[in-house]
Image (tube, rainbow, N blue to C red):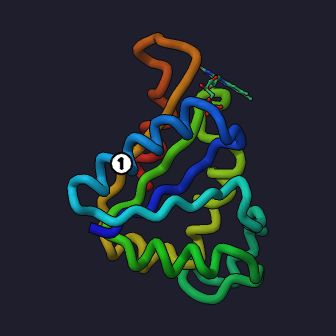
Amino acid sequence: MKIIVLFGSPNQNGSTKLLVKQFEKGAIEAGHSVEIFDVTKAKIGSCFGCVHCGYEGPCVQNDDMQNLKASILNADMLVFATPLYYYGMTAQLKATVDRFCFFNSSLTRKHIKSALIAVAWNSDSWTFDALTTIIKRL
Ligand SMILES: Cc1cc2nc3c(=O)[nH]c(=O)nc-3n(C[C@H](O)[C@H](O)[C@H](O)COP(=O)(O)O)c2cc1C
């Protein structure tokens, strides 16, 4: 399987990175290929909400989302990796997800496998509820 990981932590030496590295190791050992795309370093503007794309068409912004779109649509599995920031994903990862807008139909049609790698300070059973609800509905 081709796996793409959207790495969403601005911390390059934290728990999210640790888990993503372990995930990558395991996936490669199991025969998969893994691309780690760091959304915190990429040039990805937040969605303007203009809906010029009509939810499937060219985006008015010309940035790293163009390459990322191709990688995602070419992958078999999409992994979201983020620390919990106020019960959700980081702003950088959310901005990236919002930009899925311009290939929304292609992505939905693809029924791509997905997974979430998330870390938090809190250990209550409900800590990840909001985040997992969002990811499940994407
Ligand atoms: C801006 C910000 C918001 C955070 N919000 C939460 C939160 O809502 N719940 C929680 O349990 N931890 C929260 N944390 C703690 C981080 O999720 C936790 O420290 C995580 O391990 C950081 O990931 P990293 O090691 O990849 O940087 C927050 C941290 C920051 C910096």
Q: Is mark 1 within 8 Å of ligand 1?
A: no
Residue 4 location, x and y as percent? 44, 63
Q: Is residue 131 left or right of residue 65?
A: left
Secondary structure at numbered mark 1: helix
Q: Position of residue 59 (x, y in %)?
A: 69, 83
Q: Residue furthest bottom?
A: 58
Residue under the point 77% across and 66% down: 45
Image x and y of residue 30, in percent: 21, 54
Residue nearer the viewer, 1 or 73: 1
The residue depicted at 40 percent of the width and 62 percent of the height is 34
- The quarter of the picture where residue 54 lies is bottom right
The C terminus, quarter of image? bottom left
Q: Measuring 72% from the left and 64% from the top, which residue is drawn there?
A: 42
Q: Please say if 27 is above or below 112.
A: above
Residue at the spot 48% in from the left edge and 76% down from the top edge = 71
Q: Residues within 10 Å of mark 1 (few under 14, many from 20)?
A: few
Q: Count the labels in the image.
A: 1
- Ligand 1 sits in which quadrant? top right
Q: Give the residue at the far left of this rendering.
A: 30
Q: In the rendering, at what x and y percent does residue 104 appear? A: 49, 73
Location of the N terminus by quadrant is: bottom left
Which amino acid, by three-letter code, is at mark 1?
Lys
Q: Is residue 50 left or right of residue 20?
A: right
Q: Is residue 26 above or below residue 61?
A: above
**Front-most of residues 43 and 30:** 30
Disc 1 target residue = 25
- Left or right, residue 61 beside residue 72: right
